[in-house]
Image (cartoon, helix red, strand yellow):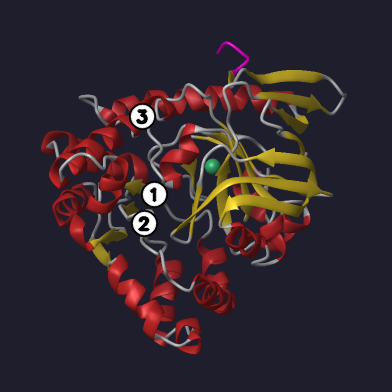
Amino acid sequence: MNKIKAKRYAKLLAKCGLNIKKGQTVFIAAAVDQVEFVEMVVEECYRAGAKRVVMVWQCDSVTKIDYAYQTLETLSEVTPFAEAKLKFKADDLSCRLFIESSDPDAMQGVDMEKVAKARQAQFPIIKPYRDKMENKHQWCIAAAAGKAWAKKLFPTLSDKQAVDALWEKIFVAARADGPDPIKDWARHNDDLAKKCDYLNGLRLVSLEYKSANGTDLTVGLNKNCLFLGGAEATLSNRMFNANIPSEEIFTSPKAGVAEGIVYATKPLSYQGQLIEDFSVRFAEGKVVEVKAKKNEDLLKKMVAMDEGASMLGECALIPYDSPINNTGILFYNTLFDENASCHLALGHGFTNCMMGFEDMTQEECTKKGINDSMIHVDFMIGTKDLSIVGVTASGERVQIFKDGNWAIDF
Ligand code: ZN
């Protein structure tokens, strides 16, 4: 790991990702093999004004043992101390940083049905806290180079070389490889904001996706929803970047309005397993058929998790020639792969896309067309020849993407 770059990246996460307010508490989730990088991040959090940093150390191999030995009943319980922690976060509106470094295949061999059932059982207890925090605190998902993940990407390199190589790719993808990543991100956020302004000015009612691979899908948009991208604001107007990297312009489409079929163009890592070569067909906004060459059953279970799991929660636009796609690497990690390709997400939508959401409850947003679900799973649909046409309320057709990239010169 290049320590100079890593320190700049750590500072970027604290200052631009979380934008910590003086006196805030910060929760950081990271894997036990990331101590060296986590030390840098924790220090930058304190320097940025945190009064307290709470570590949530994670270890996939131990989690796997828990999954194997605990009964479904035990796994399904939200213990009083887990609930107390949730309550603290919801009351305190602490910052939350998630540093991902897991092996994409970490959960292979785990009984995922049992895990999914446990999550379903926990959800009613967790949901009120999640709703209470939504749009009110700064959070950020970023990545660090884990050994198993690096070896999957660079199998011919030694362990150390592979980890160093992955770190370099992370720095490039996260726009953190220059001398002043914070300044680079200010420029990047401005650029994304310009694109959002353009799209929002069109007042689109639907998007039509077409590609030579068979994709032919029309997605309805919400009249009162905006396209967002880059930095976002909490309800108290604190800017933060929820994803580093982030290249996308996204919105929450109208739940229940989608027709046609869409083909995934990258494997989907879901609950530690890869779903590959799949398609999803929609009718009246709901998934009516899924096909996959690998892990079709898992995909079927995913869309059946709850009612909202079979409807769309996100449409995101990313040019085919994005910096991440141009690294030429499939990261097997959604944070990166979703920012390398146009994508859709099944499940939970983003209430903050809806104008006036500040004064609305989750239920009111759901009623107006923002999907609600316990899952939010992105899958990639970008191709070199993808065409996206936007249709306005007056029926005007506007070419948004042509040959995989923006059709407009900004
Ligand atoms: Zn997205």
Q: Mark 1 vs ligand 1: CB under 8 Å? A: no
Residue name at image x 55 percent, y 13 percent: 410
Q: Position of residue 118 (x, y in %)?
A: 52, 78
Residue 95 numbered mark, or none: 2
Residue 153 in which image quadrant:
top left
Left or right: residue 269 compared with residue 167? right
Circle 1 residue: 140
Circle 3 residue: 185
Q: Is residue 314 above or below residue 86?
A: above
Give the residue type at disc 3. Trp
Mark 3 vs mark 1: which is more N-terminal? Answer: 1
The count of marks equals: 3
Q: How crowded is mark 3: few (under 14 residues within 10 Å), some or many (20 or more)?
A: many
User: Mark 2 or 1, which is nearer the eye?
Assistant: 1
Q: What element carries label 1?
A: strand
Q: Is mark 2 on a helix, strand or loop?
A: strand
Instruction: Judge whether residue 337 can be spotted in this image.
Output: yes
Q: In this view, does 112 lie above or below 23?
A: below
Mark 2 vs mark 3: which is more N-terminal? Answer: 2
